[in-house]
Image: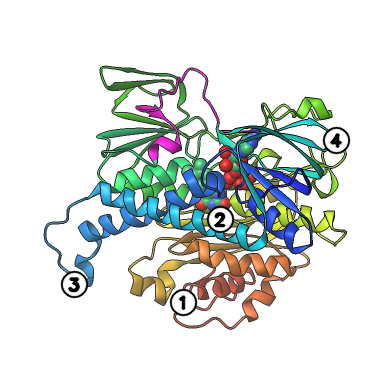
Amino acid sequence: MTRDAYDLIVIGGGPGGYVAAIRATQLGMSVACIDENAQLGGTCLRVGCIPSKALLESSRHYDQARHGFAPHGVLVGDVRLDLIAMHQRKSQIVKKLAGGIDGLFKQARVTRLQGRGRLTEPGRVLVVGLDGERSLAAKHVLIATGSRPAPLAGVALDGDRIGTSTEALAYSEVPKQLVVIGAGYIGLELGSVWSRLGAKVTVLEALDRILPGMDLDLARNAQQLFEKQGISFQLGARVENATVAKGKCMVRCSGAETLACSRVLVAVGRRANTEDLGLETVGISPDERGEIPVGDNFATSAPGVYAVGDCIRGPKLAHKASHEALACIDALAGRHAQVNYDTIPGVVYTHPEIASVGRTEQQLQEEGREYRSGVFLLQASGRARTLGETDGSVKILADAHTDRILGVHVLGPHAGDMIAEATAAMEFGASAEDLAHVCHAHPTLAESLGEAALAVHRRAIHLPAVR
Ligand SMILES: Cc1cc2nc3c(=O)[nH]c(=O)nc-3n(C[C@H](O)[C@H](O)[C@H](O)COP(=O)(O)OP(=O)(O)OC[C@H]3O[C@@H](n4cnc5c(N)ncnc54)[C@H](O)[C@@H]3O)c2cc1C
């Protein structure tokens, strides 16, 4: 039985919305969560983080089986690809996790409504579902409607040959040539997947570098490694249009030659889902990026209406959305809550992985902040040697006066796991000296963090200080 009034109505069942809904029930609120999809979990679970990581994992196994085992003395014969099985594995993972959220909702007594939600007046949400419309009342409304792939002028998506990450997660055959427009994390991850499976991948990027916003040294080193893996890059290439004729795509750019390919993946960022939400009826105006402006505790300009996740400012990341959701709901319940935007890690799940938290050197230079840098190269890591994965480095940036860690940037295997320690250290306001004192198990990749921390003070043991 569903009711007509709730303490909280959440619009959107992604990592922002579903986490908020569960947390609110823990704090004694009656909660309904509306999502238009049959599966909960949002972009992240259905067409984002999880399916992409499933394909990254599977494609890496395929690539390793073909090229990576011989140095270990493991000789394999005829390695073949079963793309259908790979996709089925991915879908099973998504299904299992989505079912898990359904279970959590039942356990927490969150009312789950499938349909589109729209504000009709302050404290009222209309749900348009498959079986009709319902108007619900709520003391508080949380908008967590997420984002969708940003469009690119001149490039008309046809939902098949010219598509976004959603299509690239489900290609039914390996494209002969794949052109990826955009060298951000989504383009690089999915470009890696299809390159490993046999596509000739070319990444076009309008800027003069890949991974804008991440540490420049790491991005340059990563680009070289991706090139060794067979991915081509054309930087400074501004795409003017892309067309399809007779199953062939043509991508025309200024600053680069016209490319013919079998598929185009447009990965030029994400755009907030803030249309058709009735925002105007409660006096909320999205900003020029289409995002909902929020103030303290994620309150919008409309009383009782809050917003978190990809539909507001900040990095479009699942853990950022969930963190904001928890802080928003705790604040609603009168608890102390905050999100520390200086310690939100970002990870690119290519091989090697690239992980960052805090400031980059470029940001510190722009801010005119004095800092010291400690770099450790994985070539000198015993663990990296045993893995056969010595490409990469760990860089720690610390305040020149207080030694407080301001940023950590890792390129290497399991960088996404290594960044957790750096994030925890920064969350607790650690100095490079503090991190250097942590006893790391040997032989682990995490030892590299300790060495990089020592390198900040020119005391690295296994490597002369690089700078
Ligand atoms: C290919 C890809 C890979 C990614 N990989 C990572 C990663 O590795 N790590 C990471 O942190 N992030 C990753 N992301 C980003 C991550 O998916 C998003 O940051 C995250 O999903 C945002 O969560 P959210 O709850 O704000 O919104 P979403 O997950 O987008 O959820 C919003 C939900 O609301 C629904 N909705 C929208 N409007 C309405 C409405 N009016 N009524 C009802 N329902 C509505 C949407 O359909 C959706 O289900 C990836 C994204 C993509 C596309």
The dominant secondary structure in magenta is loop
For badge 2, the amino acid type reads: Asp
SS of the residue under disc 1: loop
Tell me which label, 4 or 2, sits earlier in the chain: 2
Residue 214 appears in the figure: yes
Count residues near mark 1 (Cα–Cα under 10 Å), then give few for <14, some for 14-19, many for 20+.
few
Q: Residue at x 31, y 53 (%)?
A: 59
Q: CA distance from mark 4 to mark 2?
A: 32 Å
Q: Residue at x 74, y 63 (%)?
A: 26
For badge 1, the amino acid type reads: Thr
Tell me which label, 2 or 1, sits earlier in the chain: 2
Q: Residue at x 71, y 52 (%)?
A: 325
Tell me which label, 3 or 1, sits earlier in the chain: 3
Frontmost of labels 2 and 1 is: 2
Question: What residue does disc 3 label?
Answer: 73
Question: What residue does disc 4 label?
Answer: 301
The verdict on residue 166 being magenta is: yes
Ligand 1 within 8 Å of disc 2? The answer is no
Question: What residue does disc 2 label?
Answer: 102
The verdict on residue 448 being magenta is: no
Horizontal arrangement in the rendering, residue 313 relative to residue 65 (left or right) = right
In the rendered image, residue 102, in percent from the top left (x then y), is placed at 56, 55
Q: Is residue 361 above or below residue 400?
A: above
Look at the image and give the residue range highlighted in magenta: 150-168
For badge 3, the amino acid type reads: Gly
